[in-house]
Structure formats: C-alpha cells, structure tokens
Amino acid sequence: MKENKKEIIKIWKSLRELGEYDGITLSPEIQESWQRSEAFGVNPYKRCCDIIISPAELEERKAANQDLIEHSTIMMGHLHRFMEGSGFVFALTDRDGYFLKRIGDKEGLDFTGGANLTEGAKWSEDIMGTNANSLALVLGKPVQLLGYEHFCLCASIATCSASPIFDKDGCLIGVMNIIGPYHLVNRHTMGMAVATSRAIERQMALHNAYQQSEMANLHKAAIMDSISDGVLTLDHEGRIIHINQQGAANLGIDYSGAVGEKLTGLMVPENELFFTRISGKRRLLGEPLVIRRKNDSVKLAVSCTPLASKEQETLGTVVIIQPMQQYKKMIERISGAQAKMTFSDIIGRSADFEYAIQCAEMAAKTDSNILLLGESGVGKDMFAQAIHNAGSRCREPFFAINCAALPRELVSSELFGYEEGAFTGARKGGNPGKFELADQGTIFLDEIGEMPLDLQGSLLRVLEEGNVVRLGGRDITSVNVRIIAATNKNLKEEVRKGNFRLDLYYRLRVIDIKIPPLRDRKDDIPILVDYFIKTIAPRLGKEITQVDEKVLDILSNYDWPGNVRELSNVIERAINMSTEETLTADDISLDLKCNLDDQAHVWRKRLPKDPEMQEQIIRSILHKNNYNKTRAAQELGISRSSLYRKMGRFSIQ
C-alpha cells in the first residue's frame, strides 16, 4: 500500500510540474479548478486544512442548517450501517463548504481527521483548492475525485464522491460526501452519494409539505375559531366534518367529540325544523330559527350553502350560525340601520317647538307606539331618531322606511320579507324583512298615510299579534318592535274618506306629537341659520363668520312651505354663492327677496308718515308681540333693521 501511495504522490507531482504522467491528464473541469486554486493563492503543500471555525460559530451554522442536518443524519446513518467496516466516512457540508457532520467507524474518522477534514473545517476551493466537495459546490453537480486530482498534496491519498443537495426552490444548500483512502475508489460510491443526496432532498420536501399542511390546518382551525360566527361543515350523511368552538357553543354540543358524529345524534330531538332547513338543497340566508338545547333554547340566524359536485350530486353543506342579536347588528352596520340624531341635535326655542320636544322626551321613556304629525320638512325623522336613542331600545336596530317612496308591490316584501320563489326575481334563500331585522328595536314608518289599504291590515296584525309571516312562506316569526309613524296628512280625514283604517289609526296614535311648521316659529330662524352655517360651510370649504341683518329679514319674512329642510337648502345655496366671509342678501335666492319686497310694499302702507303716530303704533305693536322684534317688524311691514333704527329714533327700550 505504501508503494501505491508513493505512486499516487509521484503522479500528483508530475501533473503539477508537467501537466501529465504516462498518459494521465486532468479533465478540463479539474484543470480549470486547479487554475482557480492557484489564483486564490492556495498552498498545494499545506499539511492540512487551516481554517476551522470555533465551537460557537459551528453551533450557529448547525442551527442555521438544522433541517438539513436532521434529514442527512438519518440517511448517513443508514449508509454507515450498510457499509460498516468499509473504511468510508459519510460527511455533510453546508453551502459554504464547512463540514457540519461526519459518520464513520474509528479507522475512517482517524484517516479523514489527519488532514483536518472534520466538523468546522472549511473545504472550499479558495481554502483547500480542488477537492470533490469544493468542485460539487462550484459546478452544482455530482463529482468523484481520485487522489492525484486533488489540488493539495494532503488530500491526494484520498478519494471522494460528492453530490450537491438542493432545496425545493432549486437552491444548493449542501453537499453529501463519501470519503475514503484512494485505493477504495469505486464508481458505485458515486451512485450512492447521488442516491443519498436525492433521498435527503425528497425527505426534506416531504417534511416541508407536511409542515405546510399542518400549518395550514392550524391556520384554518385558528381562523375558524377566531370567527365570532358559528361555522360547521356537514357531509352528505349529515356528519360533522368541521366545526368551530362558537358553532358548538351555539348549538349546545360538545366541541371536542363533535367531528365525525352525526349532528342529529348530538342535538336534542326537538330540532326537526332546523335539521330539515339545513339538509335541503336550498340556500338559506339569515333564517331565524329557534334551536333547542339540553337546558334551554336560543334564537339563531341560520345561513347555509349546499355543496354540490359538477354532476349536481350533494356532497354536504356549510352552515353559519349567529345569535340573532349579532346577526341584526351586522345587518345594521351594512344597511346603516342606525339612529344618529339625539334631542341635543334638534334646534329650536319657540314655545310650541319646545313643547313638542318635551312630549317626545316623555314618549321616549315608554314603549308605546308614537304618531308624529307635521308638514314635510319639519324634522319628523329627526324626532323619530331622537326618541329611539333616548329610549331603552337605543342599542338595538333603527330602520326608517318611507312608505311613499317604495313601489306598492315592494312595501310588503320590504316590511315582512319573502321566501325563495315567492315572486319572479326573488333572491335565493329568501330575504328577511325589516320587522325581523328590527326585532327588539324600532321601525320608523314615514308617510304612513301613503301605505296601501290592503297592507294596512297586515301591519295591524303584526302590531296586535307580534308575529310575522314572510311573503310566500308559512313559518311564523315572533318579533318585538316599537313603531314610530309619521304623516303630513290629516289621518282622521283619510279615515273618513276610506283611505286609512280606523283601527290602525288608533293603534298607531297611542301618543301623538304635533311638530309646528317653521312659519309658526320664526324666532328659531337665526339659530337655525347659525347651525346650518357651522355645519355646511366647512363641508363646502367655505368660511362664513357673519350674516348680514338683511339676510335674516329676508328669511324671517318668508313663509317656508318646505320648512326646515327648505331653509337648509337655501343656506347651502347662499354659502355656495358667497364670495366673502359675510353672508349677504345678494347670496340669497331671488324668489325669497321678491317675496320680501312684495310684503314690504303692502305693509309699508300701514305705517303712517307722521312721526308721533309712527311712535305710537310701534310701541303698541311691540307691546302686543311681547317685544318680539321679528314679529313686530313683520306686522309693521318693515325689516328688523328698520325697526331697530326707529326704536332708537324714538328712544324705545
């Protein structure tokens, strides 16, 4: 063996000095590697690897390559047991050429250790020149080197088969090496190195896929359990495939043992309607159902979607369960079913208006139905919202329905809901009506006088019985809803004409509140104008700091058939037209100014030219109107600014 060793060294030296030996030459790949090694300045006569990292640095590299080491160690262990006593060492390096793990018998480990081929040593091309490990890293393919093909003399007595290891993305992450004395060279070791590296790759890929699957399951479970709704999936036989904790709690069943069991076997028998509704081929959307549990019952909003194959074969059902309160709050957020106004948002100081507010505040403390009376634009909707927010139902839904705005054929479905197939275009799964969604809350029926006569009977039944039946359905749903109705009509007259039911009129008119029109509370115009300027101007990007006195004269001498709504529109137009920080008469619409001119022309004739008579009349009118300057000016036919000037002229306090 010593002679063979000397022969190997002789060949190595000849290849270095002459580039050949008795017909033996280096392959182009090895020649290029030798040239790179020369360029790196590697000493071919070094006795061993001179770069070995510290134990702490080695532990860091092992931690960074933990998966690679774990799976490689298993495969290297199999190889060692298969080839025990062969003299080969099985070694793993990372992508930088550092040895991380060696497995072999004592003789083999001692052999490789002589050149410092050990854990922590770096056998890359720039440190140890050409070797099987470094060349596999550079070329990214399996390599087998004979002794004399190594760049360093200390490695020339060894043979090595090396095969790179790639991750799932095709990135080189390490090299599998089979190392032994030069005389053990065998092409079969190359095949073993390749097979081992591929097995490591497959093992890592399988482990990664398993981890991803487990993580996906954990994520799915975490997501499902974080959902506030109850969710369960059933197969075609009604067995539970998946259920979250909220779903089990809603149904009153044991979460831990539910999967794999039939739902009908876990719940009490008195739930036939629930089982029937979720086992059909129809979709349900927010179906209110009473669920019987072991010790109680609960009202739930049930939605379900059947799962079907391409051949329309039923595979199962996904069921979503929500407590009705939670479901209603979700609908409330989506549909904007909220009352935003409070009594503090209602502007007015006149006696009649304050009396209406007092009545509304007292009515809010009760649960009785309310009828709001007043012309269009007086703020009946604001009163309805304020009453709701001041009452015990303030945390529940508030739905406003304008009976005059909805087509006659939609009023019934809007109020009472409908079942799937109830009419052409009916939504799949049906749709709950406002009475169902507003359960425990308030419904504001604006323009109640416009409701069709036949639907008045349906509304009366709901008010008397507290039950709703959807259009096209038979199931009865109990509801507890407070009604606030509003109208600008004389309902007594409508009853006399046969347009409104007398029994419904009395049912709605438990408490009636008359809201005065703006023309009867013109003292409120200045504070309303101030409020509208402060709320509208910022929205329009305008800054209005003052209002000319003549503007208030114009507004105070107008009858306001559109009431507060019309005043708001007039102020918004004026703000849009204004180019200054002061709102002037030029910004007010021409119709209002013409109206003032016409009235002033008539009233001006009432005030005599004689100063003494003027003073007497002004004092009398002021006293008559309790020194209300706006009303006195209107009766005198002059503007408020003119009245102030005349009061100053006549020293009237």
Image (spheres, rainbow, N blue to C red):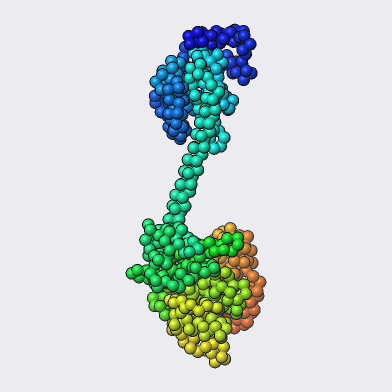
Front residue of 76/42: it is: 76
Which residue of the protein is positioned furthest toward the left in this rendering? 295
Residue at 58% over, 60% down: 309
Residue at 40% over, 73% down: 270
Residue at 45% over, 22% down: 86
Give percent across and percent down for residue 373.
50, 81
Front residue of 5/613: it is: 5
Whether 483 is drawn above or below 200: the answer is below
Front residue of 287/371: it is: 287
Give percent across and percent down for residue 554.
59, 73
Q: Which quadrant of the figure has residue 247?
A: bottom left
Give percent across and percent down for residue 437.
48, 71
Position of residue 310 in the picture relative to residue 111 (left or right): right
Q: Which quadrant of the figure has residue 39?
A: top right
Q: How many marks?
A: 0
Give percent across and percent down for residue 396.
43, 69
Front residue of 465/120: it is: 120
Residue 101 in sight here: no
Residue at 61% over, 9% down: 21
Whether 437 is drawn above or below 601: the answer is above
Residue 5 in sight here: yes
Whether 383 is drawn above or below 156: the answer is below
